[in-house]
């Protein structure tokens, strides 16, 4: 069943009633220091016992809520803590990234991207655009997600995964073809990712979009885990192979290393954990 509510701009939006009710239950449980019974929860969210019980059963099934054996009362699980930590990490990463992204932009005047990996996709969480007069239209925009196998940021993030996680992702994603340069075979992609791990940076030489080149390097946290990728992208007419090798590669890697140290990484960002 759907409902019509007002958003923060006072505009009408369609909502799913059962989802809204489940979220209210999560909010009630989050405000309590002790587990609650079904009747307590029903009273606080102003719903029938049968409705609350069904919603709680669903939340238990998906491991957002657990029921205590001794009291039969309900409380939140640590799954929500993990989700909150992930959201906080993204926020901290984006906030900390800004001066480093500005440094890249100021030094090369090419579009600078910050990305993370989510469910096998690369997700762009921040971007600073070049002020060059000649720009190319790129698919990467803040909030957009795309294939990881054919982007510099995506390959950087894939290369930073433990082998078991990488295997899961490579077995679940489709290596779609976008240009003649796109890698569409898993074994070739694995070899490419091995190169990324050893060199400390990844390239996209027109693999996602023709005439667009990108380079990215990993951002690591205090545990040495790759938590993001920072890089630059632009038209092949400006980002030539010579420019990539002689200047841009070192610039991106140096900035990524400084960024990683700011995130608590004590080693060299070119070293695989």
Image (cartoon, grey):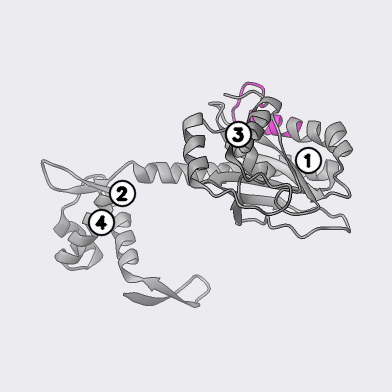
Relative to the observer, which residue lies in front, 158 or 249? Answer: 158
Residue 31 visible in the picture: no
* Rendering quarter of residue 209: bottom right
- Give the image quarter of residue 225: top right
Which residue sits at x=59%, y=28%? 264
Can you tell which mark lies on residue 103?
1
Q: Nearer the viewer, residue 180 or 60?
A: 180
First along the sequence among labels 1 and 4: 4
Which of the labelled discs sits on residue 190, or is there none? 3
Q: Quadrant of the N terminus?
A: bottom left
Q: Residue furthest top?
A: 267
Q: Which residues are magenta?
A: 254-269
| Quarter in which the C terminus is drawn | top right
Q: Count neighbours of disc 1 (C-alpha within 10 A) and say few if under 14, some if 14 to 19, many if 20 or more.
A: some
Give the Cα separation between the discs numbered 1 and 4: 48 Å
| Circle 4 Cα neighbour tier, 10 Å, few/some/many (<14 / 14–19 / ≥20) | some
> Do residues under tags 3 and 1 come within 8 Å of each other at their CB atoms?
no
């Amino acid at each position: 069943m759907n409902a019509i509510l007002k958003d923060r701009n006072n505009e009408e939006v369609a909502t799913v009633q059962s989802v809204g009710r489940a979220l209210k239950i999560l909010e009630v449980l989050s405000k309590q220091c002790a587990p609650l019974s079904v009747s307590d929860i029903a009273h606080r969210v102003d719903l029938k016992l049968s409705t609350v019980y069904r919603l709680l059963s669903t939340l238990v099934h998906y491991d957002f809520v657990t029921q205590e054996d001794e009291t039969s009362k309900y409380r939140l699980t640590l799954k929500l803590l993990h989700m909150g930590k992930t959201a906080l990490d993204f926020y901290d990463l984006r906030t900390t990234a800004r001066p480093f992204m500005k440094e890249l932009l100021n030094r090369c005047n090419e579009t600078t991207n910050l990305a993370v990996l989510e469910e096998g996709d690369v997700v762009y969480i921040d971007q600073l655009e070049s002020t060059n007069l000649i720009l190319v239209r790129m698919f990467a925009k803040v909030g957009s997600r795309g294939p990881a196998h054919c982007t510099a940021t995506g390959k950087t993030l894939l290369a930073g995964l433990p082998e078991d996680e990488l295997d899961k992702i490579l077995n679940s994603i489709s290596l779609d073809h976008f240009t003649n340069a796109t890698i569409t075979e898993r074994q070739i992609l694995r070899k490419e990712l091995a190169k990324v791990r050893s060199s400390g940076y990844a390239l996209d030489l027109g693999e996602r979009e023709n005439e667009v080149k990108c380079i990215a390097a990993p951002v690591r946290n205090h545990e040495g885990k790759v938590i993001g990728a920072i890089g630059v992208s632009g038209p092949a007419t400006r980002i030539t192979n010579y420019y990539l090798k002689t200047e841009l590669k070192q610039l991106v890697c140096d900035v990524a290393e400084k960024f990683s140290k700011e995130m608590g990484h004590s080693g060299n960002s070119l070293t695989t954990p």
